[in-house]
């Protein structure tokens, strides 16, 4: 990035709330392109990728109790650790058993199986996704049933271990009771059942019997416990929802999401784009005050609004012309597509309507467009009578001539077309001199100059004949169209300079006059504008101001 680009990029434009809507509307192609890409991607997914069926089986868990008819207390949801149950449901035992049932690999089953645990409940939801509906139903039901079997097997192992522990304890207590019974005296001669020693042994045997009874009672409860971990309350069955069921919603979501992404892309491009968006931004880059805004004619071709904007610009230009007489006013732009010809033509028309004799110099590329602008302006602002200086026309001041007299004075006969110096004064689409095509109507002779303006070069065509500029009467003034280099050295001269990016003629002409820069909204780049301003400053040319084009037509 060069110095010009860095200078232009250092000035950040503040994005307002209106720009949030205006930027996507202006960059609607970007928004539509991104939305189209997203929509096509979703459509391709729906068409080319197989549908995914997801079956769900619901398992309700219950705590293991000795009495299955006992009502659970208020803390029943805490009797089961759902985190542990979720881990068992997704453990290797369940995955491997389900894979054997579906004849698939364990990795495929693990990717397709999902287990959901609703908060605050004792429910497990087994979901299984597959390309086939039957396979998804089988997978969900098999996973749920396998979990119940695995969980019941774990309970059985725990019960068996607990029963073995009870049996071992009962055997030990029984052995103790047998040993105590051996110490009892036999019922015979000399036995005293009421002796303290005998009574202590009897109490010990009785206590061991009670302990054995309690152990057997506890063992019986463990042995009679219901080891069922739960049941499948909602088995998976057809029809199973698939990814194709909400295809319309997917497309609508893709369209809305694509438009949202497109708006984000539009704002991203806007942030990276360094084009002029507002008149203040251009004034900051150029360093001079704006002369005005010339709106775009638009599709309706509202040339009157453009001419009105140019008249306001001409008010500022007239001040400079009064301070710098006989200096050309050069209209410059970086490229041809920035509305320079529209500004130049309407500015010359506005100066002529104010009573000036304006020379409009332009290259071959914009001469035709400028002619159309000037001719259209003559229809809007027809010629008005004005005093004719005696020194210029040879006719007394305020003397008005009709068409026949004008032709006679210029060497013709009454009723004949005007020739000679007057032939350069034209109307749109013809060679008449006045507001109409009838030469006998009253004419304004202010523009009928028998000799070229002082200082104007004399050019000849390919046949060696003198070529005069095309002159168009507008209001009380006249616009004389000529080529670049054919403009006079004195008088009011407006130059439509070639694009500065390809031709230095405009900058060179501005060295002896003043430059009006044309900046197109949403088209002129900041770096290009800064480059043009730097070229003018390095050449020592004076910048009168700038005109912003491309505004909305009111």
Image (cartoon, rainbow, N blue to C red):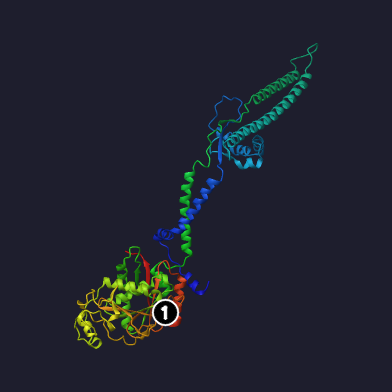
Give the residue at mark 1: 506
Q: Tell me if residue 402 can be seen.
A: no
Above or below, 389 against 310 in this view is below
Q: Residues within 10 Å of mark 1 (few under 14, many from 20)?
A: many
Above or below, 347 against 159 in this view is below
Q: Position of residue 306 (x, y in %)?
A: 32, 69
Please name the residue shown 68% across and 31% down the image: 157
Circle 1 — which element? Answer: helix
Q: Position of residue 543 (x, y in %)?
A: 39, 79
User: 439 or 293, which is in the foreground?
Assistant: 439
> Quadrant location of residue 450?
bottom left
Q: Tell me if residue 456 can be seen.
A: yes
Please name the residue shown 63% across and 26% down the image: 225
Q: Position of residue 240 (x, y in %)?
A: 53, 36
Farthest top residue?
189
Q: Position of residue 462 (x, y in %)?
A: 39, 83
Farthest right residue?
189
Above or below, 339 against 415 in this view is above
User: 79 or 468, which is in the foreground?
Assistant: 468
Q: Quadrant of the C terminus?
A: bottom left
């Amino acid at each position: 990035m060069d110095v010009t680009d860095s200078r232009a990029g250092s000035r950040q434009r503040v994005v307002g709330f209106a720009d949030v809507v205006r930027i996507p509307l202006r960059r609607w192609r970007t928004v539509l392109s991104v939305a189209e890409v997203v929509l096509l991607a979703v459509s391709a997914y729906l068409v080319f990728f197989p549908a995914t069926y997801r079956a769900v089986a619901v398992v309700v868990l219950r705590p293991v109790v000795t009495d299955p008819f006992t009502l659970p207390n208020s803390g029943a949801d805490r009797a089961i650790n759902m985190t542990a149950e979720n881990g068992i449901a997704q453990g290797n035992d369940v995955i491997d058993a389900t894979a054997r049932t579906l004849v698939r690999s364990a990795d495929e089953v693990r990717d397709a199986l999902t287990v959901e645990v609703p908060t605050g409940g004792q429910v497990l939801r087994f979901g299984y996704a597959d390309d086939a509906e039957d396979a998804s139903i089988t997978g969900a039901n098999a996973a749920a049933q396998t979990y119940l079997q695995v969980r019941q097997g774990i309970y059985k192992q725990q019960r068996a271990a607990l029963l073995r522990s009870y049996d071992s304890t009962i055997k030990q207590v029984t052995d103790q009771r047998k040993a105590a019974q051996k110490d009892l005296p036999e019922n015979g001669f000399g036995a005293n059942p009421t002796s303290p020693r005998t009574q202590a042994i009897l109490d010990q045997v009785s206590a061991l019997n009670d302990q054995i009874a309690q152990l057997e009672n506890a063992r019986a409860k463990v042995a009679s416990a219901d080891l069922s971990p739960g049941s499948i309350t909602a088995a998976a069955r057809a029809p199973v929802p698939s990814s194709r069921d909400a295809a319309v919603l997917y497309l609508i979501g893709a369209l809305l999401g694509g438009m949202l992404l497109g708006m984000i892309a539009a704002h991203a491009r806007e942030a990276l784009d360094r084009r002029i968006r507002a008149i203040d931004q251009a004034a900051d880059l150029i360093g001079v005050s704006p002369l005005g805004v010339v709106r775009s004619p638009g599709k309706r071709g509202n040339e009157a609004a453009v001419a009105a904007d140019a008249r306001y610009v001409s008010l500022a230009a007239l001040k400079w012309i009064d301070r710098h007489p006989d200096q050309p006013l050069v209209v410059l732009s970086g490229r041809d597509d920035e509305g320079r010809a529209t500004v130049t033509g309407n500015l010359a028309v506005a100066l002529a309507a104010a009573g000036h004799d304006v020379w409009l110099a332009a290259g071959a590329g914009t001469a035709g467009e400028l002619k159309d602008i000037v001719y259209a302006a003559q229809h809007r602002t027809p010629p008005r009578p004005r005093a004719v200086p005696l020194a210029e026309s040879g006719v007394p001041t305020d003397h008005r001539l009709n068409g026949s007299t004008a032709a006679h004075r210029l060497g013709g006969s009454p009723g004949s077309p005007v020739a000679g110096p007057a032939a350069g004064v034209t109307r749109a689409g013809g060679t008449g001199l006045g507001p109409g095509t009838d030469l006998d109507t009253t004419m304004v002779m202010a523009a009928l100059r028998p000799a070229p303006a002082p200082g104007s070069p004399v050019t000849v065509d390919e046949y060696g004949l003198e070529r005069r500029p095309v002159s168009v009467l507008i209001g009380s003034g006249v616009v004389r169209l000529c080529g670049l280099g054919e403009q006079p050295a004195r008088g009011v001269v407006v130059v439509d300079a070639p694009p500065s990016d390809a031709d230095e003629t405009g900058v060179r002409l501005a060295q002896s006059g003043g430059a009006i820069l044309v900046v197109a909204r949403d088209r002129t780049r900041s770096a290009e504008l800064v480059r043009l301003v730097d070229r003018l400053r390095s050449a020592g040319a004076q910048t009168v101001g700038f005109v912003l084009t491309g505004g909305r037509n009111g």
